[in-house]
Amino acid sequence: MSFLRTKAGFRLLGQGWQHINPKPVICHSFGARPIVDMSYSHHFVDFHGSSIPSSMKKLVVTELSPNFKKAVTLIPDAPVPVPGDGDLLIRNRFVGVNASDINFSSGRYAISTKPPFDAGFEGIGEVVGLGLSASKTYAIGQPVAYMANGSFAEYTVVPAKVAIPVPFVKPEILTLLVSGTTTYISLKEMGQLSEGKKVLVTAAAGGTGQFAVQIAKQAKCYVIGTCSSDEKAGFLKSLNCDLPINYKTENVGSVIKKRFPEGVDVVYESIGGEMFDMSVNCLALKGRLIIIGFISGYQSSKGILPVKTSSLPAVLLRKSASIHGFLLFHYLSEYREAITSLLKQYQTGELVCEVDNGDQTPEGRFVGLESVFRAVDYMYMGKNIGKIVVELPHPVNSKL
């Protein structure tokens, strides 16, 4: 069943996101555009007038394992999902790769969940089908982003209430959905940043570290960033990081102890293991350490490398210091304000959103779902600068 609705430009106010107000978008006029109600029919046409295929490629976790290649299977002919009354069908153009993808594939986030289940956390693309209720706030052809399971697919169904209206489909926006909001909310809630504070960011040139550096600098803090190459150190300098430290060539703990014998006020930590131990020892009086991950252990059978916890109570007590864990899904009430602010900063040029699409790898850019496996390996080799993003090209053969 199809419905016609005339709209002047894309409506950028989705259900649950009424307060997002990105810059106005200059669009080509489409005139009367069809609202394709897919909740009652499996046959539909996308906004370019070309038939959406009945099957698609997607990645499915078929075995629980921290080895992504072992855990995940590329399904070449999965049925394209049909959205319900309040859902959107999104044709994914870019999907994000996260360190936690292998925690998901190993079943660490939902112990009771058994395979098979869809992989991927975040995507951006266009609405190509939607249910009748969803058509009240979204239109065919509208660019949207989302944070939801199952993004490693050519098409994904997402509830309209969790979709995020965006001004255009660009991979830079994808960097904000998980990585940017994790930084924004955790530092706001737990960092207590203020002018002159010394902030240590581990994996500072990575997908989320890049935002920790910038947000701390916006608060007029002195920022120290760890990285694994001189190229990454150069990138950190471009973000105005005060002291990049290449941990491959320098001892981070020794450098900090020499430069700042009183310690650092805030640590944004994502590596774990020895880096966590060093970070604890570097805390100043009333210092605060925020754990947003521990990637060094994710590929191990237990998912975490050992740390020196036996002395932790004494160290924290002696310094009146504290450690805070942060998982984005526990702070979804803060998500709307975070993504709205970050989008505004990106659009005004206040925020750098570095994307790594793999174009410097021997095999070339990450294009197509097949390259997600290579992108995950690339991340765990510590090669990426910024957020790893995979492009999903969709040739459109118009029938009009």
Image (cartoon, grey):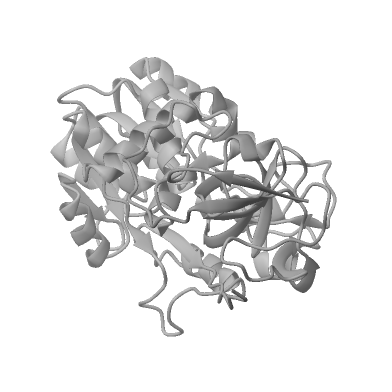
Q: Residue furthest bottom?
A: 362
Q: Closer to the camera, 382 or 365? A: 365
The answer to whether 399 appears left or right of 224 in the picture is right
The answer to whether 361 appears left or right of 238 in the picture is right
The answer to whether 104 appears left or right of 237 in the picture is right
Q: Closer to the camera, 361 or 381? A: 361
Query: Where does the image place residue 154, in percent across and percent down from the top left?
Result: 64, 65
Q: Quadrant of residue 289?
A: top left
Whether residue 268 appears in this view of the structure is yes
> For the point 44% across and 26% down, which residue is it?
19
Whether residue 213 appears in this view of the structure is no
Query: Where does the image place residue 40, in percent across and percent down from the top left?
Result: 83, 48
Which of the image's four quarters has the C terminus? bottom right
In the image, residue 245 above or below residue 111: below
In the image, residue 363 above or below residue 354: below
In the image, residue 199 above or below residue 367: above
In the image, residue 285 above or below residue 339: above
- The number of numbered discs placed on residues in the rendered structure image is 0
> For the point 85% across and 50% down, which residue is it?
114
Query: Where does the image place residue 292, in percent across and percent down from the top left?
Result: 48, 38
> For the point 56% across and 53% down, which residue is it?
33
Query: Where does the image place residue 156, in percent across and percent down from the top left?
Result: 67, 55
Q: Closer to the camera, 99 or 348? A: 348
Q: Quadrant of residue 399?
A: bottom right
> For the point 42% across and 64% down, which residue is it?
382
